[in-house]
Amino acid sequence: FDIYRKVPKDLTQPTYTGAIISICCCLFILFLFLSELTGFITTEVVNELYVDDPDKDSGGKIDVSLNISLPNLHCELVGLDIQDEMGRHEVGHIDNSMKIPLNNGVGCRFEGQFSINKEVGRQPDVRVPVFW
């Protein structure tokens, strides 16, 4: 007892064209699977830090203190860029900052303090660039 109709014999005969189409489809499916898998497995490095000050009486400034340990990065590759929407843009900010070598110079701990302009309705953008 079968609810599906039988397919005629001449439509089920294997052909070289059908084999090539099947192989191409299998390769395409494998390609899609592997590309999605690599996109899922790879990590995304984000080097942005967003800060906000709950104190409304700070005079339009936010005091920021950083203490970041980078165990596998040399200190000469670490720097601090400060940028806000009020026009301030400092590249390689070094005032009130220290780079402390870790693990015999292989790693680095970056410590820094600075003030940044508070923006209405937005958070300031502080970037700690890491160069490879």
Image (spheres, grey):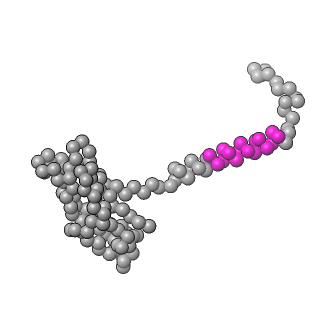
Residue 107 visible in this rendered orientation of the protein: no
Q: Quadrant of residue 5?
A: top right
Q: Position of residue 102 (x, y in %)?
A: 33, 74
The residue stretch that appears in magenta: 17-32
Of residues 64 and 103, the one nearer the viewer is 64
> What residue is rendered at 88% in x and 29% in y?
9
Q: Position of residue 45 (x, y in %)?
A: 42, 57
Q: Position of residue 105 (x, y in %)?
A: 36, 77
In the image, is residue 55 above or below residue 5? below
> What residue is rendered at 24% in x and 51% in y?
86
In the image, is residue 41 above or below residue 99? above
Q: Quadrant of residue 96?
A: bottom left
> What residue is rendered at 75% in x and 45% in y?
23
Q: Quadrant of residue 78?
A: bottom left
The verdict on residue 31 being magenta is yes
Residue 46 visible in this rendered orientation of the protein: yes
In the image, is residue 104 above or below residue 55? below
The verdict on residue 63 being magenta is no
Q: Position of residue 94 (x, y in %)?
A: 25, 68
> What residue is rendered at 66% in x and 47% in y?
30
In the image, is residue 92 above or below residue 2? below
- In the rendered image, the quadrant that contains the C terminus is bottom left
Of residues 19 and 91, the one nearer the viewer is 91
